[in-house]
Amino acid sequence: MKELLLGNEAVARGLYEAGVRVVSSYPGTPSTEITEAAATHDEIFCEWAPNEKVAMEVASGASFGGARSFCGMKHVGLNVAADPLFTMSYIGVNAGMVIGVADDPGMHSSQNEQDSRNYAIAAKLPMLEPSDSSECRDFTKLAYRLSEQFDTPVLLRLSTRVSHSRSIVELEDREERPLLPYHKDPSKNVMLPVFATKKHAVVEKRTVALAEWAETAEINRVEDNGSDVGVIAAGSVYTYAREALGDTVSYLKLGMVNPLPERLIRDFASRVKKLYVIEELDDVLETFCRKIGVPVIGKDVFPRCGEFSQSVIRRCVLGEEPETMQVQQPIPGRPPVMCCGCPHRGVFYTLKKLGVYVSGDIGCYTLGATAPLSAMDASICMGASVSSLHGFNKAIGAEAEKKSVAVIGDSTFIHSGITGLIDIAYNKSNSVVMVLDNSITGMTGHQQNPTTGYTIKGDPTSAVNLEALCHAVGIARVRVVDPYNLKETEQAVREELEADGPSVIICRRPCALLKYVKHNPPLTIDRDRCIGCKRCLGIGCPAISIHGNKAEIDATQCVGCGVCEGLCPKQAIGAKEAAK
Amino acid sequence: MSNVTSVLIVGVGGQGTLLASRLLGKTMMDLGYDVKVSEVHGMSQRGGSVETYVRYGDRVYSPVIDPGEADVVLAFEQLEAARFLPFLKKGGTVITNTQKIDPMPVVAGSAQYPEGLLEEIKAQGARVLAVDALSLAEQAGSVKAVNVVLIGAMAKTLGTEPDIWLKSIEATVPPKFVEMNKRAFELGYAAES
């Protein structure tokens, strides 16, 4: 049967067909759908772990236990999981273990553009890179065979374009794989220096063996079109090159991007007069070619930043620019915004009003940095809001503690905010942390997490009690507010900034897009009362606009959250009956 | 790749552009074409401008549509039709919903929603099919069927017969909405003349 699958769904199909039994991941665009799609199969135990490091350790343990295992994450998630990654490289596997990592060239939904191939080199692990959904499925299955044959975890590198593109996959059956027996072997699985010293040498030999395998592997293939010009490419970049240059050049299409096949590359180079290495982000393939003395054209003509496409290749190789039409008037931008009824809106409105330093984090609420809320001072990575606020306050002292807060979502707090809060309690800063608890992992499209009380499959489970957790790490002042209530929220922030000792304010209100959340009837504006002061625009709600000097509320968008009501100096905003 | 057709579907996050691209992709696969669809997930869904690429033909390599490459731009909103006009091939067709949704800079009063966009797009040499999809959807029975009306207009423009689409709709939509969505599709299909 043929299906039009997302790259991520095709990876999940590969997991299913390869007989994988355990999948543990943390959501992150563009990797999230792998684990969601895998969770639709009852044969696979799937979970959302608190963070990527936990996920990779769960997958490691499952491999020890004899089950084929997987963990998936976005590129920056691999930073979090780097610790187990490097040592699992030494340990190897019992049953096969594959790590899916999705890079985001062009930063469609990320804070940086790091190239995960560098991890494969640094951790000395094989890495496969598919270019479409069919290869996503095939390479996933191949990764398990390689993992078991060479006793190594295998990295599967994806990118936004491969993860989030659909193409045709011919489905195959699941291969039922019995659990492999577990044998106690500390020299393999306990990485004390005495054992690790020996394992390092094994890893170096393994890399040589994998490179030899790569010389003749089917996934590294030459397409000889009899041209004087050659192109070396992998992943989606290969498809862009095919699109731009067609059969006018010959190709070396690499399915394995670490380790690289030296003889195959030399042989391909010897058939052409001019050789391009086309790769997004870093010059990984190019550097290898130069190291083995093969002259290539690479980053001297192709960009290091951003996502590629066929037009980038046409411009860099052929010097061609596309012919285009455009309207002459300026087109206003349409940036992403917080949704109507978003519980984060009132929090950022309040923080802007109070003029405090806001240490931000990763999630929908990072949009609190954008106009008109413009209420964020810094945002680094998952969990950093809490710990970097502590550092900010230690640097400046009591003066800063009275005028600064951290904001962090429920899922991000569990991921790595809690460790920062422990630091605040232990090392005594008077910091105020606001946990924006919208009862879901919102940004990546509504995944359950340890605070929601449900598993990935929707089964009820225990839920972290955030209040008790904060108390337990040594925070005496913990209070809960409703972020729809601006007065209550403002009062809480003012009081906690003044208070002695660290505090946590939990702003609790479920995401307005959750199916179980009931919406109120839309609010309306009494045009006779409205004086056109535009104060209601200050919350940046997409449902409110100004027409003919009067505010208007779009009834198709408004969910009646009421946050705007309190801002109107003339009480012109209200439920329908009141306005009439 | 001259035998590949490229359809760029654009709109505002939450308008249902993904259903349109999936239905188009599935229909073309059922018709025996090679297909690639590229979707936008994550940050861009939050009320922002969204774009989805659908390409089909004998053999499709790239899932991306670049400026100057789209045979058809299907816009769920007028401003988005204008924004993505540079992606249209010379002589290509813009199918656009006549609906206007103010973006945040307009809402906040820092920019004006441009007037006369459709005329300007025509003046550039594009073939324009403007569809009042909101009214047609209401006529079909629900304002939520705007995307299916637009799919109908696109199906005609691409030179496909209604039957295979109606089958896809039957297979995709919950039973109680099938008739309404079929009406919406047919109204959209008839809007293209």
Image (tube, coloured by chain):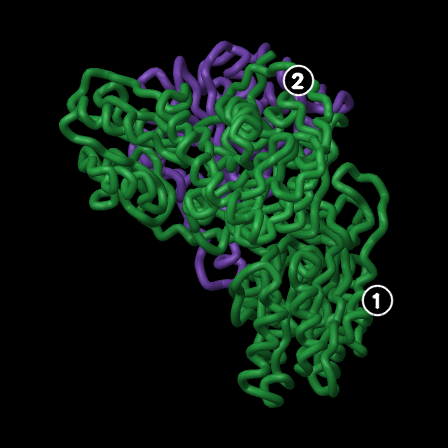
* Residue A375 image point, x, y percent: 56, 70
Chain that is coloured green in the picture: A
Chain that is coloured purple in the picture: B
Nearer-the-camera pick, B123 or A498? A498
Chain containing the residue with disc 1? A
Residue name at image x 71 percent, y 65 percent: A435
Nearer-the-camera pick, A510 or A259? A259
What kind of residue is marked 2? Glu
Chain containing the residue with disc 2? A
- Secondary structure state at the residue bearing disc 1: helix
Up the image or down, A463 lies above or below B91; here it is below
Residue lying farthest to the front in this orientation = A194
Spatial CA distance of label 1 from label 2 is: 45 Å
Q: Which residue is mark 2?
A: A175
* Residue A364 image point, x, y percent: 61, 55
Up the image or down, A147 lies above or below A27; here it is above
Up the image or down, A110 lies above or below A539; here it is above
Rendering quarter of residue A496: bottom right
Q: Which residue is mark 1?
A: A468
Between discs 1 and 2, the one toward the N terminus: 2
